[in-house]
Amino acid sequence: MKSSSATAQFGAAHRAYHLMSTDSVILEDTAADWLLGPPLSTVLHIAPLRWLFWRPLFKKVRLMSAFVVIRSRYTEDVLGQSIQDGCRQYVVLGAGLDSWALRHRDSIVTVFELDHPATQQWKKLRIESRMGSLPPQLTLIPIDFEHESITDLLPRHGFDSQSKAFVSWLGTVYYLTRGAIRDAFASLANSCAPGSRIVFDYFLPKSMMLPTDQQLFGVLDKGGTRRGEPIVTLLDANEIEEVLCSTGFRIVEDLSAADIRQRYLSQRSDGLDVPGFVHLCCAERQKAG
Ligand SMILES: C[S@@+](CC[C@H](N)C(=O)[O-])C[C@H]1O[C@@H](n2cnc3c(N)ncnc32)[C@H](O)[C@@H]1O
C-alpha cells in the first residue's frame, strides 16, 4: 500500500451513510462524516451526486456496508464491557477512520491507533483541520504489519504490558499475508496482559461461499485490487482457532453471519443483511503456563 487506504475511507463512508439513511441506528458514528471529508462526504450529502455516484456502488456492496457498521457496533459493545471490567487501554489495529477516540474525548481510556503511515498521516491532517490537535488520550503509531512488530512499538509509546488492554482489528486481516497475521497475534500475546481481549473480523474461503456471496466477494476483491489493497488471506474457523490457540489466546466467541443476523438484525424489518462469508471473533489472552 503506497497511499492512504481507500478501503478505510469507504468504511467511514458506510458508517456515515448508515447514520443518514435509517431511523433504526445500529452505530452512531457521528464523526465518520467530518473525518471523511470531501469528496466522499460531499457525494453523500448532495442528493444528485448521491444518486449518481453513491447509490450504484452501495447497491453492489449493500451487505458489506451493513457488516462494516455492525462490526464496529459489536466491537464497541465488547469494548464497553471491558471498560466496565476495569480495562483502561484500547489498541486499534488498522484503525483507518475509526472514530471511537474522537467521540470519547473525555474518556479515561488511553487509545493507541496503529495503522499504515500513509493512512495515519491522512487521518491526522483531517483531525487537526477539524479539532486543532489530536485528543490528549490518543496516540498514533505508524506500522506496517508485514514488516514490523507490535511488541517492539507499543511499549515505546507508553503502553503498559502489565495492565489489561482491549484490542480491535477490523477490516484488515484479509489484506495481510498469513505470516503477518500469525506474527501480529503472537506479538499481541507478548505485549498484552492475560485477560486482554481482541475483536477482529475475517472472511471465509471462496469454496464456502454461496454463489451470490461469491459475486459480492468478486466486487470487493476487484475494487480492492484496483486501489492497491488486494484481499490476500481467507481463513476458516478451524484455522483461526489454531492460530489463536498456538499464539496464546482462547476464543470467547466466533460469530458466523447467522449469529450476527440473530444478534443485530432479527428485530429489523428493513431487510438489512450481511454477507454469508463474514465472521466476527472475540478472543482472550490466556494466562501463560
Ligand atoms: C478496510 S480499512 C479498515 C479500517 C477500520 N478498521 C474500519 O473498520 O473502518 C483497512 C486498514 O488496514 C490498514 N492496513 C492495510 N494493510 C496494512 C499494513 N500492511 N500495515 C498496516 N496497516 C495496514 C489500512 O491502512 C486501513 O486503515
Image: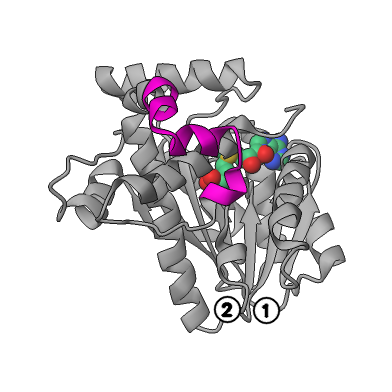
Residue nearest the observer in this picture, 231 or 33: 33
Does residue 97 appear in this view? no
Question: In the image, what residue occupies the spot 50% across and 45% down?
Answer: 242
Please tell me whether residue 27 belongs to the stretch shown in magenta.
no
The spot of residue 19 in percent (x, y) is 38, 51
The correct choice, above or below, for 10 with respect to 153 in the image is above
**Residue tagged 1:** 163
Q: Name the quadrant containing residue 44.
A: top left
Question: In the image, what residue occupies the spot 44% across and 40% down?
Answer: 14
The crowd level at tag 2 (other Cα within 10 Å; few <14, some 14-19, many 20+) is: many
Q: Quadrant of the C terminus?
A: bottom right
Cβ atoms under marks 1 and 2 closer than 8 Å: yes
Quadrant of ligand 1: it is top right
Query: Magenta segment range?
Result: 33-53
**Residue tagged 2:** 87
Relative placement, left or right, of 274 versus 2 is left
The spot of residue 196 in percent (x, y) is 57, 70
Question: In the image, what residue occupies the spot 57% across and 57% down?
Answer: 99
